[in-house]
Amino acid sequence: MEFRQLGRSGLKVSAVGLGCNNFGMIIDQAATNTVVDTAIDAGITLFDTADVYGRPNLGGSEIFLGKALGARRKQVLVATKFGMPMGDSWDLQGGGSRDTVMRAAEASLKRLGTDYIDLYQLHAPDPQTPIEETLRALDDLVRQGKVRYIGHSNFIGWQTSDAAWTARVNNLTPFVSAQNRYSVLSRMIESDLVPGCIAHGVGLLPYFPLESGLLTGKYKQKAAPPAGTRYAAWANRGPAMTDRFFSDDKIAVAEQLGAIAGETGGTALDLAFGWLLSKSYVSSVIAGATKPEQIASNVKAGTWRPNADQLKRIDELSPPPAKIGF
């Protein structure tokens, strides 16, 4: 397993991370234990969850992950998130207020069965709360030893820069990571967020790297999706669900990307991971798994890299967004 610095921090993370959103929602505790065991054996050290994961039982993912880790807690890095609404009562409305940060952190620590969180991430921007208030609360958690590093999720470029400036001028703990949707087929953040991350030393943690399974190579044009796949489940809910990831155009591009990887013995899955990890600003690729064999495939894919010619043709098939500025 390759290990990378998380932004400009001193924290090293496995190049392939495990997204834990399926825990408590798609798979039960026994299956979670198997997935976590396999991930640790494969060298994965970064486990990413959130307080809202595990629907309909909010917090279920953190509980399942904490139990699965058990005595191995100190061998891994636990990343979780806060800020999304957890319920209807006044204290569960989410956001980045000091009150929310402190309450959410204590609740996550209890569910995870740990006394510290390695990476605590604001799940989404909170336009109602000044970023300085959020950062001061997070800085207190760091100084108390309850949180080691902090990150944000779903920010855009100016929000990343604003947070970095606010932390610097107020001598507060800065965000060291950004978690956003990013894949070879979804490159929008390259025009805005990525330059901000590079400028401020923020490591990128892409989510949806496989475009909900599109880049696994299992789907074909004009063919019914295999039974039991996410596409098959979504197909019954109408085009609004499927077109976000599984339009005919996207499937066609995914097939061509797989063919490019095949020239050097790779697959569409290899290209999905390898293309992201060819970017120096990507610290770890976060991908979910419900079965041990998926862990093995993801870790293997994390070792593949496209060559210069392949990178050029990938850009032709899935162009980067237009640059912002003069």
Image (cartoon, grey):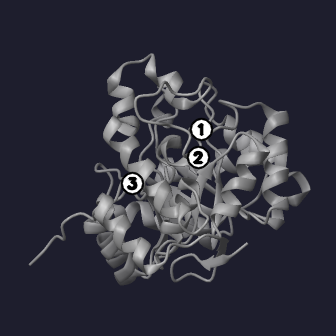
Rendered residue at 70%/62% (across/down): 300
Type of amino acid at the residue the image marks with label 2:
Ala
Quadrant location, the N terminus: bottom right
| Among the two numbered marks 3 and 1 on one chain, the one whose residue lies closer to the N terminus | 1
Which dot marks residue 154?
A: 3
Q: What residue sits right under mark 2 in the picture?
A: 50
Q: Residue furthest top?
A: 236
Q: Please tell me whether mark 1 sits on a helix, a strand or a loop.
A: loop
* Circles 2 and 1 in contact, beta carbons < 8 Å: yes
Q: Is residue 260 left or right of residue 303?
A: left
**Relative to the observer, which residue lies in front, 78 or 230?**
230
Q: Please tell me whether mark 2 sits on a helix, a strand or a loop.
A: loop
Q: Is residue 55 left or right of residue 275?
A: right
Which percent across, then down, holds residue 89? 49, 27
Examine the rendered structure and indicate whether residue 282 appears above or below residue 240.
below
Q: CA distance from mark 3 to mark 1?
A: 16 Å
* Circles 2 and 3 in contact, beta carbons < 8 Å: no
**Relative to the observer, which residue lies in front, 177 or 185?**
185
Q: CA distance from mark 2 to mark 1?
A: 5 Å
Type of amino acid at the residue the image marks with label 1:
Tyr
Rendered residue at 73%/65% (across/down): 45
Q: What residue sits right under mark 1 in the picture?
A: 53
Q: Residue furthest right?
A: 71
